[in-house]
Amino acid sequence: MSTSNRSGATRGPEPVGRANLADVARLAGVSTATASRVLAGRGTGKAASHARVLAAADELGYVVNGLARSMMGVGRRSIAFVSSQMVGPTFAAMASGAESVVTAHGHLFMMCTTHGDPAVEAELIDSLSEQRAAAVLLVGSTPTDDVFTERAATYADKLARVGARLIVCGRPAVEGLPEIASIDYDHVGGIEAAVAHLVTLGHHRIAYVGETDRMTTSQQRYLGYRSALERAGIELDESLVMHTDNFTEQAEEILHPFRAEHPDVTAYVCQTDMIAVGVSGALRAEGVRLPDDVSVVGFDDMPLAGYLTPALSTVHAPFREVGVLAGRIAVGDVPYESPIVLPSAFIARDSSGPLRAK
């Protein structure tokens, strides 16, 4: 059906969805309340009026207002996966796990990115609250300062007002805010296992490559390095800590001057597999053989870790399992009582080996 202006010119087809609930009720010969019940799935399927309402809605091209239904507590509600970025196997695995549960329960799964901008993050939470999202999964490492704690408290309060909950994934529980669900994996234990593996192989000059305290993930993994050395009776040498962000190229750049100053280092514990790849590449460029001369271990067990040359020894983190559990809590499939920390597992491959006698 087309519409025309006063001069007779055609303006094109009438926009889809222009019919409203009153139009459907009028055509079906029922009350607006009856039409609303039928279209919300609460009507009696055997009633003649039920069929008339559905037929009228189809004839008029009526589109149900999903947002209005969700605001009334019926229909499909959305569950949002919010992270600073949406790249890499870590986020993909976690998102895949959550999505598999959410969609199986008939909810909508939304993926949102903040690019690390707190203002964008706050705007997203406001929008999701307005749209009556059922839950928000706030994913990934966060700053270790009190500013994030204050933001999280505000987010949780806004979501609670519309019957939604905030779930943090891949970071420790937010201190002092037990109402915020927390699902993490064992960063500390994973690094402890990696260091213990190297110590068992005879290594004592073990360097750490990564950040140490700016974000929750780096803080937890560095803590694992320190505690593992202490357990092994090895004194911490701060000069063996190489500070780098999670970039392969940056790890490569800082490795060369470090090696010149610390030629006695025989093993490198890397905060992530991405960093381990950079360290390994820089060592090979210097003619260092892995693991004959030096051992390297990472963290994350990214999909290609086992296919590198040599295959990378690393800590397997249960990213997908975190996502699945977060999704189950979000849809109400399992109750949440206290912070959850899933175990990590060290996987020994070819990039780590016994200390060679000199």
Image (cartoon, grey):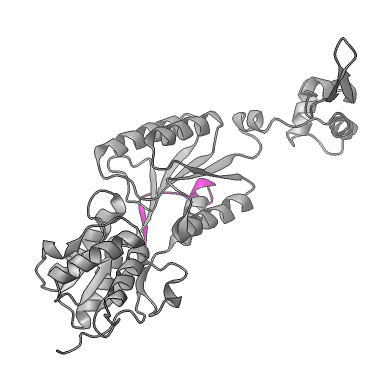
Q: Residue at x 18, y 79 (%)?
A: 203
- Give the image location of residue 161, x and y in percent: 47, 29
Residue 338 higher or lower than 62, as above or below = below
Of residues 244 and 212, the one nearer the viewer is: 244
Residue bounds of the magenta highlight: 329-342
- Give the image location of residue 204, x and y in percent: 15, 76
Q: Main secondary structure of the magenta part?
A: loop
Using the rendered image of the protein, determine whether residue 322 is visible from the camera's viewpoint: no
Of residues 130 and 355, the one nearer the viewer is: 355
Quarter where residue 302 is shown: bottom left
The quarter of the image holding the C terminus is bottom left
Residue 36 higher or lower than 309, as above or below = above
- Give the image location of residue 207, x and y in percent: 19, 68
- Give the image location of residue 238, x and y in percent: 12, 61
Of residues 317 and 356, the one nearer the viewer is: 356
The quarter of the image holding the N terminus is top right
Q: How many marks?
A: 0
Of residues 232 and 244, the one nearer the viewer is: 244
Q: Is residue 335 magenta?
A: yes
Q: Residue at x 54, y 51 (%)?
A: 333
Q: Is residue 163 left or right of residue 21?
A: left
Q: Is residue 224 magenta?
A: no
Residue 61 higher or lower than 323, as above or below = above
